[in-house]
């Protein structure tokens, strides 16, 4: 684990990022006190779901587009 002060981190950011990309953690310190840690980002790539995987799980009833009953509409008019 490498520790750099803020000035060094600003001056050598490209090097610090190369170290992080190689798997090393870099600590950025201010006045010798650790302030932040640079670590590699762990990407979790989701595989795209195949089309049609919800087949049979979603059911649309025949009256889904009909107007709402008057009793339900009244609750929206307050």
Image (cartoon, helix red, strand yellow):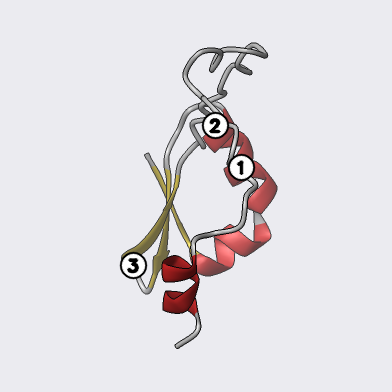
Real-space CA distance between mark 3 and mark 2, rounded to the nearest whole angstrom: 66 Å
Answer with mark 3 or mark 2, whichever residue precedes in sequence: 3
- Label at residue 32: 3
Q: Vertical placement of 2 versus 70: above or below?
A: above
Quadrant the C terminus occupies: bottom left
Real-space CA distance between mark 1 and mark 3, rounded to the nearest whole angstrom: 20 Å
Residue 70 lies left or right of residue 21; in this view the side is left
Q: Report the mark closest to the observer, 1 or 3.
A: 1
Q: Residue furthest front?
A: 70
Residue 5 lies left or right of residue 9; in this view the side is left
State the SS at label 1.
helix
CA neighbours of label 1 inside 10 A, class few (<14), some (14 to 19), many (20+) = some
CA neighbours of label 2 inside 10 A, class few (<14), some (14 to 19), many (20+) = few
Q: Vertical placement of 37 versus 11: above or below?
A: above
Residue that appears at 53% across and 36% down: 20
- Name the residue tied to disc 1: 17
Q: Report the mark closest to the observer, 1 or 2.
A: 2
Residue that appears at 59% across and 42% down: 64
- Name the residue tied to disc 2: 61
Query: Residue 11's x, y, as percent?
Result: 66, 60
Answer with mark 1 or mark 2, whichever residue precedes in sequence: 1
Query: Residue 33's x, y, as percent?
Result: 30, 67
State the SS at label 2.
loop
CA neighbours of label 3 inside 10 A, class few (<14), some (14 to 19), many (20+) = few
Q: Nearer the viewer, residue 55 or 3?
A: 55
Query: Residue 50's x, y, as percent?
Result: 64, 11
Q: Nearer the viewer, residue 41 or 60?
A: 60
State the SS at label 3.
loop
Q: Vertical placement of 26 versus 41: above or below?
A: below
């Amino acid at each position: 684990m490498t520790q750099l002060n803020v000035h060094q981190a600003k001056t050598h950011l490209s090097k610090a990022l190369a170290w992080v990309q190689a798997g090393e953690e870099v600590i950025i310190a201010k006045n010798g006190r650790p302030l932040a840690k640079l670590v590699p980002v762990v990407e979790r790539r989701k595989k795209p779901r195949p089309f049609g995987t919800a087949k049979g799980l979603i059911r649309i009833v025949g009256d889904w587009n009909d107007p709402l009953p008057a009793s339900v509409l009244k609750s929206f008019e307050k």
